[in-house]
Amino acid sequence: MRVMAQMSMIMNLDKCIGCHTCSVTCKQVWTNRTGVEYAWFNNVETRPGLGYPREYENQEKWKGGWVRNKRGRLQLKAGGRLKKLSQIFNNPNLPQIDDYYEPWTYDYDMLTTAPAGTQSPVARPKSLLTGQDIDIKWSGNWDDDLGGSQETASQDPILATMSEKVKMEFEETFMFYLPRICEHCLNPACVAACPSGAMYKREEDGIVLVDEDACRGWRMCVSACPYKKVYFNHKTGKAEKCTLCYPLIEQGKPTICSETCVGRLRYLGLMLYDADAVLAAASIENDQDLLDAQRACFLDPFDPEVIAAAKAEGMADDWIEAAQNSPIYKLISEFEVALPLHPEYRTMPMVWYIPPLSPVVDVVSNSGSDGEDARTLFAAIDKLRIPVEYLAGLFSAGDVVPVELSLRKLAAMRAYMRDINLGNEPDERIPNAVGMTGETITAMYRLLAIAKYEDRYVIPKAHVETARELDELGCSLDNDGGPGMGGPREHAGPHNAGDAGPAGPYGNTPGMPLNATVDNYNQMVGDSPIIKTRPATPGRINLLNWNGGGVPQGLFPPIADAGSPA
Amino acid sequence: MTAWDYLLWVAFPYAASGVFVVGHLLRYRYDQFGWTSRSSQTYENRLLRWGSPMFHYGILMVIGGHVVGLFIPKPWLEFFGVTEHMYHLGATWLGSFAAVLTVAGLAILIYRRRLTKRVLLVTTVMDKFMYVFLASTIAFGTTATVLYQIFGGGYDYRGSISPWIRSLYSFQPDPSLMSDVPFFFQLHVLTATTLFLLWPFTRLVHVFSAPLGYLVRPYVVYRSRDDPRGAGSRAPRRGWEKSERPLERSRK
């Protein structure tokens, strides 16, 4: 048994209202740079729908993930090592930028500089690749809220596998939102496909990262990821991906997408797992057994044997405690309501989902029945095959049993808690019908409905080792402008951390380059007068870093001297 | 021998070799972030799907042929029973096949780079510079082979060019060996030397990243936060060029 910790996420789809706040804040932080305009480390797609990039789930087309070969061994779906190397000059499975969408902006300048005329000026869309006018025909979220789905949804790869077809007529369609980030898999296909060995899984928290210095731009990771969550920066020629906001996670803080989620539907916490068991679990024969196989890899953080083994691996006590308090462990292993996205890709994904009951509730309520009555809901889950089968296509390789069980638990929770809210005698038969007790179902209700910030995000801080602290001292010759560099740095950030401008994330600073790390983060953003007052670009202040106090230098344009030309 | 002979066949190759070695070492030390093939496959794949494998497999064969022809002395091959006639046949026919692949592939690639607007806009000045010398090296080499080896009587460069190169690397340079070499071979050598001079400053550095280690390493790579190569532990180094929005550039 080799105990490893995995920082994991669970999203409660019943609460997602499809507002895209997670996507927008993520983009502002990570991908507002040239070269990744088209990339959304976090995206929210409407299901049924094609997703982003278009039809990414069709692995017959994209050859992502793993397959079990005839000898019962796991191999990348796109082929073995020799085949991959032979295709290095042209990756046959690489999505084109048009499969995501051609990034564009608008010619806003025209609105203010157009000569006076009889017509209002318009800001035409311009391609960010060529600068020319484009006709926008697709984007990262073109079928949002089923817009245009009568045309496109039939190409949804999940619908294609279902026995019954969803009618795309307005009153007969169900829909829900699916927010997606990198899955930070236990058996990541992207890492396995990287010819350079530049992608890695962090030993401490399992976050999958790209070493931007070691990446040589072979693009195998992009096609190997079945979720298409590694992106090729077409400007720098390097791969980039969701980092699970590791600089925040290391501080014990939630990711940007979690922090800004208005529905508070995201949970973050540790899962302990047996790294030695992963390969065998991922190689299991039947696709539909993969969910249970993955669950069996997870370790009970209360088991004394597991605790002893974790300590033997050097895991700190506060990490074991965090694993015991983890909302992820409760939702996956105790309540068993969370399910992985596409376990059949055999990557052992670690961003799990609580399937949405709302498509079922909506149908029940619309038909005039009581949408919170346990028996009605149970019957509806049995009867409404289409949503359940569709969800099974997403979360359990097509096996409806785990999805049904999860939905029944959610339905039982609604019914049981309604009795309590109305002051009725709670009916213990309801939780018993789904294998739970009143106590556990109340605990699940507390976690899903009213959990506080610190209950939703149980994130232990990273431990700074001595070697790292010494490393931070750096070399005095290696400063910006120092003899080791020969001028201000032009690119502020490998390791996905950069912005394209000349300034670092906290503005230009004299002396040591400011890198937010575990040991100096609070000091840097909390106290540093440099950060608060120094403008990120000459003559301007970065309002995002302004705490609202005083009048920092650069808040207003400089007052022109009398007589000097304006 | 004139001063020109010394300049072209001694000084220039040594200068180019020096820049090649030192340039690569410096770039590897200071510009890991810029060390990439800078693929444009996401922009255009219809032409690249054919052009890129043709060019790359062709040029690999060409490089293999050059290693045999230039660095293995004639007596060594003869020891293994490879006669002059066999060598000539092999070099001419295999070489021609590789040349056709390479030239056709390169033609597709240059056509694509020039006429696909998305690809053209990300082409740097250094790329264009590199393309000129790469294409002319291949063109002169092919011309020399066709003129002298196929239609001419056959020129034995293993008696002149090969010993000249080996004389350079044994540090006993003999420029007289190159004086009487046919014109297109001379041109081929000169453009190739210039290409080596430019090499460390172009995207050609990706040649030295051929990921052969992939064949033997474990599939899933783990790395500790405390790994000195890890994220966030050192000052970011210079990238390969300042990024600029294409829209702004196209307006200039």
Image (spheres, coloured by chain):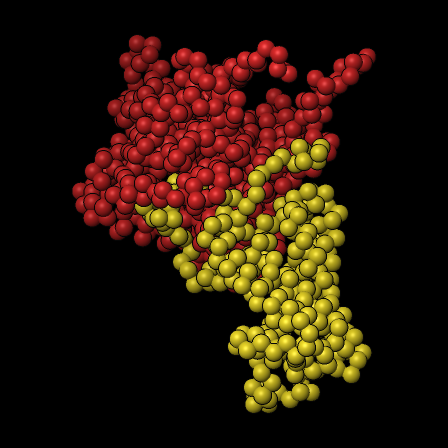
Chain colours: A red, B yellow
Does the rendering let one see residue B139?
Answer: yes
Q: Nearer the viewer, residue A508 or B240?
A: A508
User: Image quadrant of residue B72?
Assistant: bottom right
Q: Position of residue A29 (x, y in %)?
A: 48, 30
Relative to residue A240, is residue A276 drawn left or right?
left
The residue drawn where x is 73% and y is 56% is: B108
Q: Position of residue A284 (x, y in %)?
A: 40, 52
- Residue B136 lies, in percent from the top left, at 72, 62
Q: Nearer the viewer, residue A235 or A9?
A: A235
The part of the image, by quadrant, that contains residue B43 is top right
Quadrant of the image occupied by residue B217: bottom left
x, y percent for residue A311: 20, 45
How many dots with numbers? 0
Q: Reply above or below: A79 against A551.
A: below
Q: Residue at x 59, y 63 (%)?
A: B16
**Above/below status of B100 relative to A507:** below
For the C terminus of chain B, the image quarter is top right
A268 left or right of B202 in image: left
On screen, B90 above or below A375? below
Asked whether residue A434 is in view, the answer is: no
Q: Nearer the viewer, residue A487 or A389?
A: A487
Horizontal arrangement in the rendering, residue B232 relative to residue A144 (left or right): left
> Quadrant of the image for the N terminus of chain B?
bottom right
Instruction: Write the residue at 78% across / 83% down.
Output: B153
Q: Which residue occupies 41% across, 21% down?
A: A532
A425 displayed left or right of A195: left
